[in-house]
Amino acid sequence: MNTKPVTVKKPQEIASPKGMRDIIGDDYYKFQGFFEKAQEIAVYYGFTPIKTPLLEYENTFTTAIGIGTDAIDKEMYSLKTKGGDQLALRPEGTAGVMRAYIENGLQNQPQPVLFYYYGPMFRHDKPQRGRYREFHQFGLESLGSEKSIIDALLIKATITILEESGAKDLVVQINSMGDKEDRVSYIRELTNYYKKHINQLSALDQERLKINPLRILDSKEAATIEINRGAPDIVSHLGTAAKKHFREVLEALEEMGIGYEINKNLVRGLSYYTRTVFEIAEPATEDGSEPLTIAAGGRYDLLARQLGSKKDVPAMGVGIGVDRVVETAWFKDLSPRIMKKPKVYFIQVGFDAKLKSLNVIEILRKAHIPVMQALSKDSLSAQLAVAEKAGVPYTIIFGQKEAMENSVIVRNMETHSQDCIPVTELHTYLKQLK
């Protein structure tokens, strides 16, 4: 007899994965409204849409972003397909856009090629305020021009999107990471500086010193932040070309009236950046909490060659954290164009009326008149109760008699007055109502 104890599995909890969530109802419309506003502004500035896959070959990101960055070492979701391909959920949008540019031969089009995109990104990061493992990003990318005016264009477009979403008093934190040659001497001096303070660095920052010293400038450790105040300044190591480029970007921002602060410790977290890097934080809050960065980007002139291109492709990009924007107190709750609040509730009573109900609703749809309805309900009182709760000003009552006569009753929910209207004239009648 088998006496082995039976293991009873606990029922799996019905829940979304940690750091991911459902977006429902009004919250969904907030995201949709922001995307429509951002897309509208992007189009005015000359950007065109692109959609890249959620999954890319893993080396698209490991090559582009670089080993020694949190996005690769700790946060990337990777998987192996049945066919043996190593894929990854995209942790950011830029590498995929550059891959698409190269693969589709877009370097043969008039340059620069300007793209905007919108969609979810994934990082296995610690969930906290404004940070999710599945997060949404609106991005702008310019590929094929090294001109400083492109940097200013993307910053201006980003500021415009945020201001028209409700933000005020935005300040751009900006720096230059110089060219590849400029960074050699700078990293050497930076490394020597940190070695003098090695015992005060955390274990994580000591590890970064071996792999990617620039990442220490981005450290959140209190002791390291203090050490960074005396760190060497990368701007003083810029070569002639990079220095001229940076000066021109700042001059363009001043010309447009965009406030900025040069932050010598701003390096951004991904390794493909060169020259201009910037961040935009939300305005300071009254409760004293630290403002969240809501947009960030920079120039990545070396990325194409890192991905395998035979030629460099000068490029500039920015990403806006949409989750952070829509959760701020200043967000306008932009109403999307697809959302028209119905002013009519459609009520049907009886089998014949239910059978013909969709035909009436289709007439209204073609006339661009949205309605609320409860076709699954049969009772007049139950449907009226739902209409009352919804607060719609008018109801359409479609019963057996009306179905036979091809008419409806339109009731004013406030005055309880009502009119009998032929279905063929219904859309004209409703459009005249206030």
Image: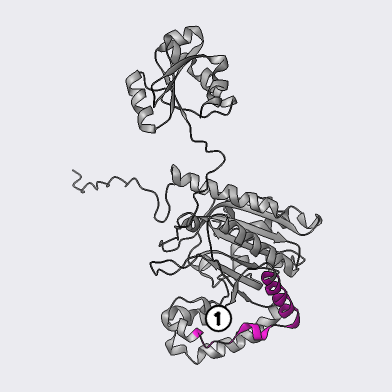
Relative vertical location of residue 67 with respect to residue 233 in this rendering, above or below: above
Residue 46 appears in the picture as rendered: yes
Tell me how the rendering is colored.
one colour
Who is closer to the viewer here, 66 or 381? 381
Q: Position of residue 364 (x, y in %)?
A: 55, 24
Per the image, is 251 magenta? yes
Q: Which residues, given as a range, are shown in magenta? A: 228-254
Q: Quadrant of the N terminus?
A: top left
Quarter-wise, where is residue 149 in the image? bottom right
Quarter-wise, where is residue 97 in the image? bottom right
Residue 52 appears in the picture as rendered: no
* Most common secondary structure along the magenta stretch: helix
Give amino acid for label 1. Pro
Q: Position of residue 76 (x, y in %)?
A: 51, 61
Q: Position of residue 78 (x, y in %)?
A: 51, 58
Residue linked to disc 1: 213
Q: Secondary structure at mark 1?
A: helix
What residue lies at 51% left-to-right and 85% top-to-bottom?
229
Who is closer to the viewer here, 431 or 190? 431
Who is closer to the viewer here, 396 or 148? 396
Per the image, is 175 magenta? no
What residue lies at 50% left-to-right and 64% top-to-bottom?
282
- Dot 1 surroundings within 10 Å: few (below 14), some, or many (20 or more)? some
Q: Position of residue 190 (x, y in %)?
A: 57, 86
Relative vertical location of residue 145 with respect to residue 335 in this rendering, above or below: below
Judge left or right: residue 376 versus residue 92: left
What residue lies at 38% left-to-right and 67% top-to-bottom?
287
